[in-house]
Image (cartoon, rainbow, N blue to C red):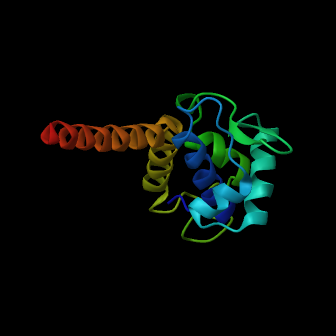
C-alpha cells in the first residue's frame, strides 16, 4: 500500500493551496501564508517550495510583493509529479521480508501487491491539482449564488 512521507504530504498541501488560488493570475503567496493556511511548519514549507521550484512546478519571486504561484496550470500537475520528488521507490514491500520476492519464488501475496501498486500508481498519475481549484471555484459560486438570492429578496 502507498504510504507517503511527511514531506510528500506537506508538498501536496502547499501545492493544493497554490492550485486553489490559480484563478487569480497576479496573486502570489508567501511560504508563511501557505504554512498558516495549511497548519504546516514554516521552515518546512520554505524548503519544500524550493524543491518544487527547482522541479519547475512552482515559480517564486523574492522581496516585497513576491511569493509563490504555480508554474503551470493545476491540470498539468499530477500527484505523481510530487511523489516522484519526495518518495523513494521501495521494492521491499514483500510481507515475507526484504530479499524474498525477486530472489526466490514470489510470496503468496506478490501478484496482489503488484496489482495494488499499479492501482495506486494509476491514481497518482491521473489525479491532478485542478481538483483543488474546482472545489474552491464551486464554493465561490455557491456563496455568490446565496448572496444574489438574498439581494433579490430585499428588492
Quarter containing the C terminus: top left
Left or right side of 10 for 47? right
Q: Residue at x 64, y 39 (%)?
A: 81
Q: Is residue 91 visible?
A: no
Q: Residue 108 appears at what percent x and percent y?
A: 45, 62
| Image vertical order of residue 23 relative to residue 83, above or below | above
- Seen at 56% across and 33% down, the residue is 24
Where residue 12 appears, x then y in whole percent? 59, 51
Relative image position of residue 34 (x, y in whole percent):
64, 55
Residue found at the very far right of the displayed protein: 63
Residue at 13% x, 41% y is: 153
- Can you see residue 61? yes
Give the image location of residue 6, x and y in percent. Answer: 65, 65
User: In this orientation, which residue lies closer to the viewer: 119 or 17?
Assistant: 17
Q: Is residue 73 left or right of residue 89?
A: left
In the displayed structure, 145 sits above or below 108; it is above
In the image, taking residue 35 as reference, residue 78 lies left or right, namely left
Note whether 93 is above or below 123 in the view shown: below
Q: In front: 23, or 132? A: 23
The mark tally for this picture is 0
State the residue in front, 55 or 122: 55
Quadrant in which residue 69 is drawn: top right
Amino acid at each position: 500500500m502507498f504510504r507517503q512521507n511527511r514531506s510528500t504530504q506537506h508538498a501536496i498541501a502547499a501545492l493544493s493551496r497554490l492550485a486553489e488560488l490559480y484563478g487569480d493570475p497576479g496573486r502570489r503567496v508567501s511560504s508563511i501564508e501557505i504554512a498558516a493556511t495549511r497548519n504546516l511548519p514554516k521552515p518546512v514549507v520554505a524548503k519544500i517550495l524550493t524543491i518544487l521550484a527547482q522541479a519547475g512546478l512552482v515559480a517564486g519571486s523574492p522581496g516585497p510583493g513576491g511569493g509563490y504561484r504555480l508554474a503551470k496550470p493545476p491540470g498539468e500537475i499530477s500527484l505523481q509529479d510530487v511523489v516522484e520528488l519526495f518518495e523513494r521507490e521501495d521494492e521491499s514491500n514483500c510481507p515475507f521480508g526484504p530479499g524474498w520476492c525477486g530472489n526466490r519464488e514470489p510470496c503468496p501475496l506478490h501478484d496482489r501487491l503488484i496489482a495494488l501498486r499499479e492501482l495506486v500508481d494509476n491514481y497518482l498519475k491521473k489525479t491532478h491539482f485542478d481538483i483543488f481549484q474546482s472545489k474552491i471555484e464551486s464554493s465561490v459560486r455557491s456563496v455568490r449564488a446565496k448572496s444574489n438570492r438574498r439581494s433579490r429578496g430585499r428588492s
